[in-house]
Image: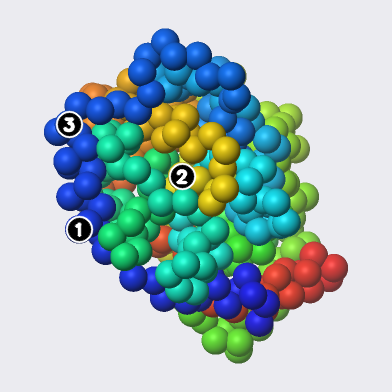
Amino acid sequence: MTMLDKNAVSHWNLDRRSFLAGAAAAAGSGLCGLRPGVAQARPVVAIMPGVFLPDQVRPLIETKASVKVENAPYVSPTDTLAKLLAPGGTSRYDLMISITNFVRGPVMGEKAGDENVAAFDLSLIPNAAKIMELFKDDIVVRDGKTYMIPVVWGYDSVIYNADKIPPDDELTQSWGVLFDDKYAGKVAWRDDAHQTILAAALHLGIKDPVTMSAQELKEVTSFLIKKKKNVRTMWTTFGTGVSLLSSGEVWALYGWIPMRAALQKQGMNVTNNWPKDGLLVWSQSAFIPKESPNAKATHAVVNAFLDTEVGRTLAETTNYPTTSSEIAAGFSPEDRKRIGLDIEERGVKVHPMRFPAAMDQWLEAWNTVRSA
């Protein structure tokens, strides 16, 4: 097992109550990070999915935080960890946002003192007191200090063209639409070991894929190899996924919710499914590399992400909401359903997108699938 995997499966002392007490105190103090209008000579250098900072949201973030945000190229959670853990990585960047349960092991290290990130000063993030109940367990605290704060949440599912695949087709109610022979040549998978293996394992009825046995992983691998003949292609970037659906090259793919939003804005009749085998739900947390030279301004950016106006704008623009409890309440029931903020109301079976203990074996299995 690699050091990355070893760190990923370690246990951490997460004192959530300490975080909540600090956040509540910060909220009561009326502090709000950097003073509005204060110019910052150095921008906050961030690695995060670009979809979290669209054109409609960037000026809100930068105005509320009084600092420019400079996006470094984002590839994946694995790449984000590689950048953080590379020599000089803890001083090269100011802010990182990535999937909480995927990155927190390597981010935190095995024990106190091993953290690769700096603790937050909650007096500079009063909006953290608003984090919704559903994601309070994703707050990462050790020895009374907060190191990771969930700021955006969402879910992955199948995005499909409803003009080509009838919504009442039973296949659309599961991950099976990506694997069944019925739509051979018209589906695309995500070229990602973690996400595609999770979806396939859930479809095969494995209750907790991240702890599945070596034999179960072998069965999932065999299933994917068998079904690979149905796959038109695999995508790696947001733009590629959107293009595949908009061009008609594929009718369904493992997708991200902003793909649905982007295609609907183009006038396409696309939607997402609510897989009965388990909707993959995640939060993405903000953290500050340990030696960030611009940590105070970074606090202001994190606080701005949790601002109500920012969260509502992000949800309307990308359909990704922030973790603020005030966001969903700002939309009508109809709009909550349209945007997809109503998963609790729907009673959908959810499955957290956690990091598998045997990630090295998953990567090996995926390489086998790709080369088959």
What residue is at 37 percent from the left and 58 percent from the top?
A: 140
Tell me the quarter of the picture where residue 230 sits.
Answer: bottom right
Which residue is at the front of the view, 321 or 173? Answer: 321
Residue that badge 2 annotates: 286
Q: Which mark is residue 29?
A: 3
**Which numbered disc flags the more N-terminal residue, 1 or 2?**
1
For residue 209, side relative to residue 34 (left or right):
right
Within 10 Å of disc 3 (Cα), the crowding (few <14, some 14-19, many 20+) is: few
Q: Is residue 185 above or below residue 7?
A: above
**Which numbered disc flags the more N-terminal residue, 2 or 3?**
3
What residue is at 26 percent from the left and 63 percent from the top?
A: 15
Looking at the image, do the residues carrying marks 1 and 2 touch, with CB atoms under 8 Å apart?
Answer: no
What residue is at 60 percent from the left and 89 percent from the top?
A: 215
**SS category of the residue bearing label 3:** helix
**x and y percent of residue 263 in the render?**
58, 27
For residue 51, side relative to residue 33 (left or right):
right
Q: Estimate the spatial distance between the alpha carbons at disc 3 and disc 1, rounded to whole Å.
A: 18 Å
**x and y percent of residue 127 in the render?**
28, 34
- Give the residue type that dot 3 points to: Ser
Within 10 Å of disc 1 (Cα), the crowding (few <14, some 14-19, many 20+) is: few
- Give the residue type that dot 2 points to: Ala
Within 10 Å of disc 2 (Cα), the crowding (few <14, some 14-19, many 20+) is: many
**x and y percent of residue 254 in the render?**
60, 50
Residue that badge 1 annotates: 17
- Can residue 364 be seen here? The reply is yes
**Which numbered disc flags the more N-terminal residue, 3 or 1?**
1
Which residue is at the front of the view, 335 or 185? Answer: 335
Q: Estimate the spatial distance between the alpha carbons at disc 2 and disc 3, rounded to whole Å.
A: 22 Å
Q: Estimate the spatial distance between the alpha carbons at disc 1 and disc 2, rounded to whole Å.
A: 19 Å
